[in-house]
Amino acid sequence: MKVGLVTDVLGYMPLEDMLDTVANLGVETLELGCGNWSKAPHLSLDTMLEDSSKRHQFLRMLRERNLSIAALNCSGNQLAPGPSGIEHDQIVRKTMALADALEIETVVLMSGCPGGSPEDKTANWITHPILPEHTESLRYQWEDVALPYWYELEKDARRKGVKLAIENLGNNLVHNPDTMWRLRRETGPNVGMNFDPSHLFWMGGDPITALRQLEGVIHHVHAKDVRIERGLSDVNGLIDVNAIDTPSLRAWNYVALGYGHDAAYWSEFFSVLSMIQYSGPVVLEMEDLTMDPLTGVVKSIDLLKQTLPRTFNNRSEVEAK
């Protein structure tokens, strides 16, 4: 399992500075945002698609630092009603084309979430279908919108030799193992999961138990932690609509690795991940708003290297010898 990083967290750094920084930290592989929810700070999707020399130059910069690309990320809501869904889908298609051109195996994205009916103008994530109209909305979302879209997208991915790794984020139709398997059964093997344990934490699940239910369907893994905030979650539960950038008000928060669950937890998590025959990259996504981004990356990478079931050489120690 290689140590990776979603580079958006260091989006304030110019490309070469970012590459030097992460290489010196012992990061081995990168997940690069291509658009939609990402501002794509380190990669111009259109430029890379149009100019092969830019692609070769980009890959050379990585090789010079012993870095590789683990995945391209185009997370957004391509199933949203109206123009935004169309625009997000265009970025998905371009990202898949760039993955093909760069010979990158994995594209990370979301399943998307449609409106609750053909008349809706905004996405509608239904979590408590207590009324008949909610059940009909779920049927419409899955059968009329999501399954036809993903059936066609999986075929396109197969033609390009690309695996689609769907992140299990709330506000999307695919947000847990059950919904992942439903989509996989209806589409094909190039559709799998980008397993992000942080989202199961805040939805009340157990990521280690979930791993065993996902054997054979995990294409990619994020290393990301959540802390359930005592005194707030106990009162209000885990459904929290306070803004993500107001951490002091929230029942749960994304935190640096180890700030929600300790090293013993993550050692077990990665050991079970190995048991289910996953050997791909483990990519840090750092979204802790209580500390400086680079500090959060350094602390998280240190814990990641401590708990992954492999040995690491400290680059500075090796060079000193």
Image (tube, rainbow, N blue to C red):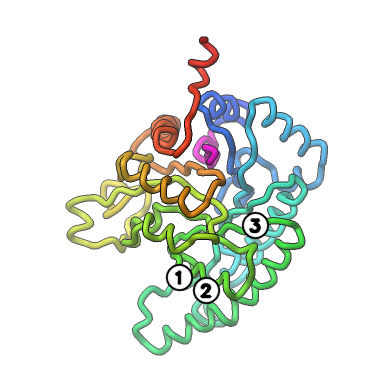
Residue positioned most to the top: 321
Q: Are marks 1 and 2 in contact (CB under 8 Å)?
A: yes
Q: Does the magenta-highlighted stretch encompass residue 30? A: no
Q: Are marks 3 and 1 in contact (CB under 8 Å)?
A: no
Q: Does the magenta-highlighted stretch encompass residue 3? A: yes
Q: Is residue 312 left or right of residue 33?
A: left
Q: Quadrant of residue 171?
A: bottom left
Give the percent coordinates (x, y) of residue 214.
48, 62
Residue at x 54%, y 37% (from the top left corner):
11
Instruction: Categorize mark 1 by other alpha carbons within 10 Å: few (<14), some (14-19), many (20+).
Output: few
For marks 3 and 2 on the same chain, the one whose residue lies earlier in the sequence? 3
Give amino acid for label 2: Arg
| 188 is higher (above) or lower (below) than 251 | below
Q: Which residue is mark 1?
A: 178
Give amino acid for label 3: Lys
The label number, if any, that marks residue 163 in the structure image? 3
Instruction: Categorize mark 3 by other alpha carbons within 10 Å: few (<14), some (14-19), many (20+).
Output: many
